[in-house]
Amino acid sequence: MTASAPGLSLRRQLLIWLLLPQLVLWAGGGLLAYRIALSYAEKGIDQSLTQSVRALARQVKPIGSGLLIDFPRAAQDVLEQDPDDRIMYMVSAPPDGFLLGNQRLPQPSIAPAAPGEPLLYSASFDGKPMRFVAMEVNYGEDNAPQTMRVQVGKSLAVQQRIARELIADMLAPLLAAGVLLSLAVYGGIQRGLAPLTRLTSQLEHRSVNALSPIGMTQAPNEVHALVQAINGLLDEVARNVNQEKRFINDAAHQLRTPLAGLISQVELAQRETADPVVGARLNKVLTGAERSAHLVHQLLTLARTETTARRETLDLAALAREVAREWTPKAVASGVDLGFEGTDHREMQGDALQLREAMANLIDNALRYTPRGSAVTLKVEAHGDSTRLIVEDNGPGLSDDDMAHAFQRFWRASEQPGGCGLGLAIVKEIARRHGGDAQVERVAPQGLRVVLTLM
């Protein structure tokens, strides 16, 4: 079962859900404020246009059946002096007959409700948005009534520019306040997630077998609940691990004494019998007993390596030379050349007993599965901040399929007597207890190399 890809971190989710609504509200508030500013600007324009159309209508005085236009040139210049904000006007009588002002002003889609009542409407003139007001005035004799339409229009460009400037002046402080609020939110999230960060750090820096409870003195209730749940799980795991270790230790200790006695009795029986058939059977019993005793020893070793390594300063090169000297007599008896290569001194933090056990397992495997006349070399090399412990031989090696199973428990590549399939598993476990790993490599033209990387 593969682990799913991690999603967004809790920090990012909080930032998104806290800052995104703020950004949406800021943009929505700016748009609403712009609409309101335009609305008030339009109201101001409507009021100004209404006053202007009434004033212009008063300058056109009916005389009998005609009109007297009293519109000084100075007033006309005032209306038209600003090209960006000038006022358009037109007097027509009848409504489609031009008398005064700007021709071709847009006409309202509907007629004013009653004479003297201004009608406000929006239209485009020369490609520019404008606001217009139209008002109709009755004049003439009773028997010949006539209607005059007065229109006044004003561009919306200046008002829109003023509205934009007003919104910019309003939103700039809001943007600065939003930035400060975002920084405050980010700081609050950092502070709120600090207990989780400390908890993560404690868990990351714990060794694999450190199952003691986690201590959190200052943390929110939710984090305390999480810590309590984790501590409960650690306590349950610790009980199960201790129970398993007790079972393995008790079983191994209970089996070791009878097996030692069985081996002694079989060896005595071999010396006392002259029957070759009985001797062959006793030899099989002795081989099985020795294999069982070796298995018990390996189980005890595995139970010890599954505890936390006791780190202390040691010279791995000196320890390797000492182990090589201890195994030299057995190598000579097996017809194998055992030697040491590498640096003279390499200090590191580690458990001397576990590292000695790892080297012993590797050398034992190499001597067991390499033919007479082969060479086995124990090496210690510096590799950056880490140390490499290597056991290399020029024996038959392993196939690709066998190398994939080399570190599995109780897996054996050969049916030769004596092995139990735990040696390399113990070696890998010891490497992990020292913050590293173990690998098997093929040696050209033939042979096998086991490399332990120790931190």
Image (cartoon, grey):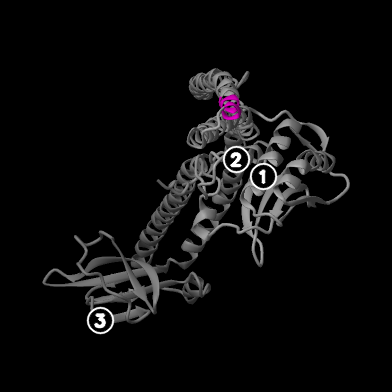
Q: Earlier in the sequence, mark 3 or mark 2?
A: 3
Q: Which residues are magenta?
A: 266-272
State which tag comes first along the sequence, 1 or 3: 3
Which residue position is annotated with label 3? 97
Q: Position of residue 448 (x, y in %)?
A: 64, 56
The residue at the point 51 percent across, 63 percent down is 161
Identify the disc placed on residue 149.
Answer: none
User: Residue drawn at (63%, 57%), measured in percent from left and top?
Assistant: 441
Residue 123 location, x and y as percent? 32, 70
Residue 362 has which mark?
1
Determine whether the residue tagged by mark 3 lies in a helix, strand or loop.
loop
Our reading of the magenta stretch's main secondary structure is: helix
Callout 2: 10 Å neighbours few (<14), some, many (20+)? many
For residue 437, say whether it is visible.
yes
Q: Amino acid at mark 1?
A: Leu
Real-space Cα distance between discs 3 and 2? 113 Å
Instruction: Please give left or right for residue 319 compared with residue 117 in the image.
Output: right
Please tell me which of labels 2 and 1 falls first in the chain: 1
- Tag 2: amino acid: Gly
Check disc 2 and report the residue beneath it: 423
Amino acid carrying label 3: it is Gly
Classify mark 2: helix, strand or loop.
helix
Counting from the top left corner in percent of width and height, residue 286 is at 55, 32
Q: Nearer the viewer, residue 304 or 7?
A: 304
